[in-house]
Image: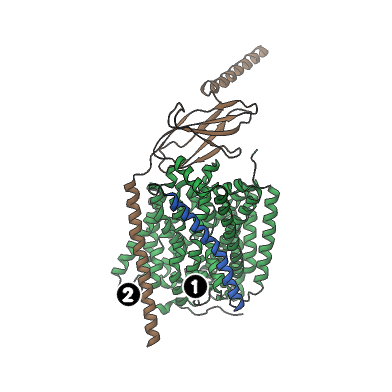
Chain colours: A green, B blue, C brown
């Protein structure tokens, strides 16, 4: 007889209320969408407030609310500090976002850029990496949704996962990018307020010094600044974060949808706002030993502690926070991935003369298709969240150097960029299996960087930046 | 080498204060955008 | 004849059944079984799971950890959450640890499980620091490259405007 923090009916009620609200809100925002550009990039005119909030909220994922406490529970102090360094991804992307907005005034996706800058071979490698990563993330989010509902309210994993996916697909389908960004703003506020509330409650009732003295006595390893496994994990995690942000169309399509001159400060602000959040969520896990809470699996520590100490009200808060965190990333990923498929594969490869209306219809079916595919892949509960994501680190970190150099440096050619991404990924995977998860992204980034360096030294070509601007090629009806 | 209690307390408190400042900042920016009609 | 044969078969099956039912009771004195990681733990955290062979439901599963097999030194207790049978433990320093599970049935009778030994041996610090510094060097190179290239671009943009 497991006692769940929430009654199953309460959990379902919250989900349905939020679901109806988000979908209606998405529908209301979607009325403004006149063209595919409106739908996919919110008219390329998003202001500073929404831009900063969406950058922050999208980066607050199931990772921040579930995996940050998990890593803190396992690695202690370095788990949460290391996790918060993932904000560097957003901060370093800020200058690049400004550059992207200027280089590709009419661009749609990161795939667009790679194809125009590096050619077809590099594009193919890049698309494979993007798709593997996008699905890894989509599945981990879908699974997190199911696991969350089950651990808090006892609702069956499959029902919970299906509901969350349906809601996110629903409002993204109706509202496009506008709905994604506007819901992100509200979800960002909910997440921050909720997380601060739980952390404040813990400090007020349990006390920081008592947590510190308990850990010193019972689990000193968690306060150790020279915890070997945690020290090893630190930079790997940073490169993983950089790779995720630099390559993913989630961040490129945001940069392209922001108003001119907003992209730089929006990413910088978003990163700074995000920085303290993993410390606050991770801290929740450090209180667990003192409270006598030892979860069945480490990824459940955050929700379990919050629900256990705050009772029913706390469980509702946790439930809403994690639901918002999941939704704010799931919607962005659905929208950005279907943009990538619509623009890079359908529009550029299959139907170059497709009308605006056809593109919009295709984009919508894509969102739906991605949702269904994710649902199918989430049906079996494969791995714990962390394990699944660490595997993707080898893939994304290989894109860091090719993207960075491709944006600013004219000498790196497509062949070397493709080799850097392919061999970076390969060696990252080898490292993952031969040594451990904490070297996957590091190896991948190092190998790809070396290949890029050779490429720059050996190349005598200079890329013409004007080749990037394809102009507006959409055929109106 | 364990983290000292003072450093631990400061780190958590600072993170919490920064987190609390975020919604105020975001709402302020939103109102500013709303008044100047630059939300979208 | 046929009846006799049937009787013989029946007895034979019964004998086998008796033998089978005797087997587990001789090897397992307790209805509780604790299992944990087989290899050396390098990160200081691990998950142990408790399984029961008894038909009766056992409650209040607790894991006891000590630094000796008699459970007389540094004994710590870690209660399981709800009726979950898996427990994640964390924050262990280098050393050998002895673990066993304790549980109660509905009549408040206490059962103890088998004892398992878990060895925690963290990665050597030099190895961790080597990786740390390799990461640091790559990271600094990356940030420097980005800032340098971005500044060059901003400069050239301003020059173009002035021309």
Q: Are marks 2 and 1 on the same chain?
A: yes
Which residue corresponds to the image point at 69% horizontal and 57% vertical from the top-left? Answer: A16
Give the label, 2 or 1, closer to the camera: 1
Determine the secondary structure under disc 1: helix
Question: Does residue A380 appear anywhere in the picture?
Answer: no
Q: Position of residue C50 (x, y in %)?
A: 54, 34
Dot 2 surroundings within 10 Å: few (below 14), some, or many (20 or more)? few
Chain of residue at mark 1: A
| Front one among A75 and A400 | A75
> Disc 2 versus disc 1: distance between alpha carbons?
30 Å
| The residue positioned farthest toward the left in the image shown | A458
| Front one among C139 and A23 | C139
Q: Is residue A152 above or below residue C118?
A: below
Which sits earlier in the primary sequence, circle 2 or circle 1?
1
Q: Is residue A205 above or below residue A477?
A: above
Which residue corresponds to the image point at 33% horizontal and 59% vertical from the top-left? Answer: C137
Instruction: Name the residue beneath numbered marker 2.
Output: A461
Instruction: Name the residue beneath numbered marker 1.
Output: A263
| Front one among C36 and A365 | C36
């Amino acid at each position: 007889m497991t006692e769940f923090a929430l009654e199953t009916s309460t959990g379902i009620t919250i989900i349905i209320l939020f679901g109806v609200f988000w979908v209606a809100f998405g529908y209301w925002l979607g009325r403004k969408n006149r063209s595919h550009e409106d739908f996919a990039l919110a008219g390329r005119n998003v202001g500073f407030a929404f831009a900063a909030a969406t950058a922050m909220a999208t980066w607050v994922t199931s990772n921040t609310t579930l995996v940050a406490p998990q890593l803190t529970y396992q690695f202690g102090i370095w788990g949460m500090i290391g996790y918060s360094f993932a904000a560097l991804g957003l901060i370093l992307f800020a200058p690049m976002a400004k550059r992207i907005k200027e280089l590709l005034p009419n661009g749609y996706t990161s795939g667009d850029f790679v194809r125009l800058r590096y050619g077809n071979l590099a594009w193919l490698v890049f698309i494979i990496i993007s798709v593997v990563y996008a699905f890894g993330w989509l599945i981990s989010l879908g699974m997190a949704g199911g696991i969350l509902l089950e651990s808090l309210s006892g609702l069956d994993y499959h029902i919970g996962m299906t509901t969350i996916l349906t809601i996110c697909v629903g409002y993204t389908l109706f509202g496009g990018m506008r709905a994604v960004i506007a819901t992100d703003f509200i979800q960002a506020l909910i997440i921050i307020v909720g997380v601060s509330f739980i952390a404040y409650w813990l400090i007020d009732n349990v006390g920081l010094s008592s947590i510190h003295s308990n850990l010193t006595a019972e689990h000193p390893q968690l306060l150790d600044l020279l915890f070997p496994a945690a020290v090893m994990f630190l930079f790997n995690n940073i490169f993983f974060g950089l790779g995720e942000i630099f390559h993913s169309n989630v961040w490129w399509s945001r940069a392209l949808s922001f108003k001119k001159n907003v992209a730089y400060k929006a990413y910088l602000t978003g990163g700074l706002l995000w920085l303290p959040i993993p410390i606050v969520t991770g801290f929740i896990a450090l209180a667990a030993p003192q409270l006598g809470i030892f979860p069945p699996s480490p990824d459940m520590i955050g929700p379990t502690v919050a629900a256990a100490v705050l009772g029913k009200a706390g469980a509702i808060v946790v439930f809403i926070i994690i639901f918002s965190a999941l939704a704010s990333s799931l919607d962005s990923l659905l929208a950005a991935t279907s943009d990538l498929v619509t623009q890079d594969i359908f529009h550029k490869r299959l139907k170059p003369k497709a009308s605006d209306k056809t593109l919009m219809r295709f984009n919508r079916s894509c969102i739906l298709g991605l949702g269904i595919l994710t649902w199918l892949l989430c049906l079996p509960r494969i791995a714990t969240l962390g394990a699944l994501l660490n595997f993707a680190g080898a893939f994304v970190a290989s894109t860091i150097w090719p993207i960075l150099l491709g944006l600013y440096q004219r000498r790196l050619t497509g062949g070397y960029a493709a080799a850097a991404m392919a061999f970076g990924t390969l060696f990252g995977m080898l490292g993952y299996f031969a040594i451990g998860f904490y070297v996957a992204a590091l190896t991948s980034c190092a190998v790809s960087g070396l290949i890029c360096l050779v490429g720059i030294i050996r190349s005598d070509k200079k890329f013409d930046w004007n080749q990037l601007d394809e102009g507006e090629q959409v055929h109106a009806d | 080498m364990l983290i000292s209690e003072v450093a631990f307390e400061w780190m958590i408190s600072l993170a919490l204060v920064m987190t609390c400042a975020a919604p105020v900042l975001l709402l302020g920016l939103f109102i500013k955008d709303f008044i100047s009609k630059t939300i979208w | 004849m046929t009846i006799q044969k049937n009787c013989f078969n029946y007895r034979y099956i019964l004998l086998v059944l008796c033998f089978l039912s005797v087997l587990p009771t001789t090897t397992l004195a307790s209805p509780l079984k604790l299992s944990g990681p087989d290899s050396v733990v390098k990160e200081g955290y691990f998950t142990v799971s408790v399984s029961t062979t008894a038909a009766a439901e056992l409650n209040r599963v607790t894991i006891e950890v000590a630094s000796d097999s008699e459970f007389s030194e540094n004994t710590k207790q870690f209660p399981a959450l709800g009726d979950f049978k898996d427990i994640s433990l964390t924050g262990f320093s280098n050393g050998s640890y002895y673990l066993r599970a304790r549980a109660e049935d509905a009549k408040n009778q206490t059962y103890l499980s088998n004892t398992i030994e878990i060895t925690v041996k963290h990665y050597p610090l030099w190895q961790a620091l080597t990786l740390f510094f390799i990461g640091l060097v790559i990271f600094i190179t990356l940030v420097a490259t980005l800032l340098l290239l971005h500044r060059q671009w901003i400069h050239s943009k301003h020059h173009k405007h002035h021309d």
